[in-house]
Image: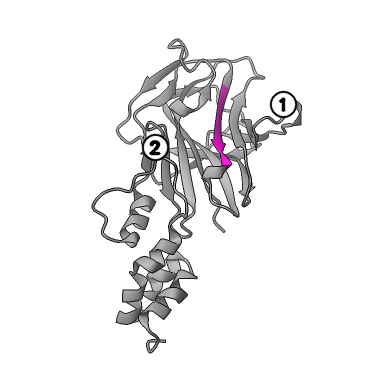
Amino acid sequence: MNNLPEDCIAKILSLTSPRDVCRSSAVSRCFRSAADSDHVWNHFLPSEFPEDFRAPEGLPTKKHLFFSLVHNPLLLHGSQLSFSLERSTGNKCYMMAARALNITWGHDQRYWQWISLPDARFKEVAALKMVWWLDITGKINVSLLSDNTLYAAYLVFRWNLDPYGFRQPVEASLVLAGTEHDDVQPSMVSLMQNPGSEQGQRAELRSDDWYEVQLGHFFKRRGDMGEIEMSLKETKRPFEKKGLIVHGIEIRPVLP
């Protein structure tokens, strides 16, 4: 294949994946040159970017832009939403800030406090002081997402030094916005890694030292319209809950 013209090699590489292209660059000098071409990496960038997307300055090639979006999520929508790309596929990823979520009593300082943390992606996160009724909901328009892709939504959170009231699983759901309440069948998830009950999916520690727990998943098809509504609730047990710090909800492709 080294005898093929470089543009032919670039065309072939553009039909593979970002991971395969990076591996192929070790084959030969010709492959390395083709693997770095804008023609290849433009294929892995989205055909449509979010409305207020602005490419970072100082990126000389499409490959630099691709990996910048993989490693450095961009803040959009008044810094209430972050946009990035999944490394192995180039599919779109988003994270909604806590401020973009509907948190019951979230604006009442008796129950929630808005604080800044140095390792948070957004300016503010929501710190739970104390509630009996926990209800956190977010919505995202599916038109923002990559077509023909399986997505999952995750609540991203951590604990303060004295959490209380989360030993039992809580309800999580992901549905089309507008779905009747009686038609929603929530799953049970455990926010703590060592819950008092074995029921439900457990939270996992991420590489950025936040926890995440899956709220649900859905398949985005070409032409799908409307909004997806994601929620985490605990409204049936009348006991206090405190110590939860909400970073946001992340929506990203499910990898094989």
Q: Residue at x 44, y 48 (%)?
A: 49
The alpha-carbon separation of the residues under discs 2 and 1 comes to: 31 Å
Q: Quadrant of the N terminus?
A: bottom left
Main secondary structure along the magenta-highlighted residues? strand
- Which one is in front, 170 or 161? 170
* Residue at the extreme top of the image, as rendered: 110
Which quadrant of the figure has residue 27?
bottom left
Mark 2 or mark 1: name the one nearer the start of the chain: 2
Q: In the displayed image of the protein, which residue is found farthest to the right?
A: 182
Mark 2, Cα crowd under 10 Å, few <14 / some 14-19 / many 20+, is some
Helix, strand, or loop for circle 2? strand
Is 182 included in the stretch rendered in magenta? no
Q: Is residue 161 visible?
A: no
Residue 101 in view here:
yes
Q: How is the image coloured?
A: one colour
Side of 191 where 109 appears, left or right? left
**Residue at (37% x, 27% y) in the render:** 124
Q: Residue at x 39, y 37 (%)?
A: 76
Q: Is residue 190 above or below residue 66?
A: above
Q: Does 29 appear above or below 164?
A: below
For disc 2, the marked residue is 76
Please tell me which residue lies in front, 203 or 216: 216
Q: 223 left or right of 122?
A: right
Q: Report the magenta residues as a range.
A: 135-142
Magenta stretch containing residue 136, yes or no? yes
Residue 164 picture location, percent across and down: 50, 22
SS at circle 1: helix
Task: Please tell me how crowded label 1 is: few (under 14), some (14-19), or many (20+) other residues with Cα within 10 Å.
Answer: few
The residue indicated by pointer 1 is 181
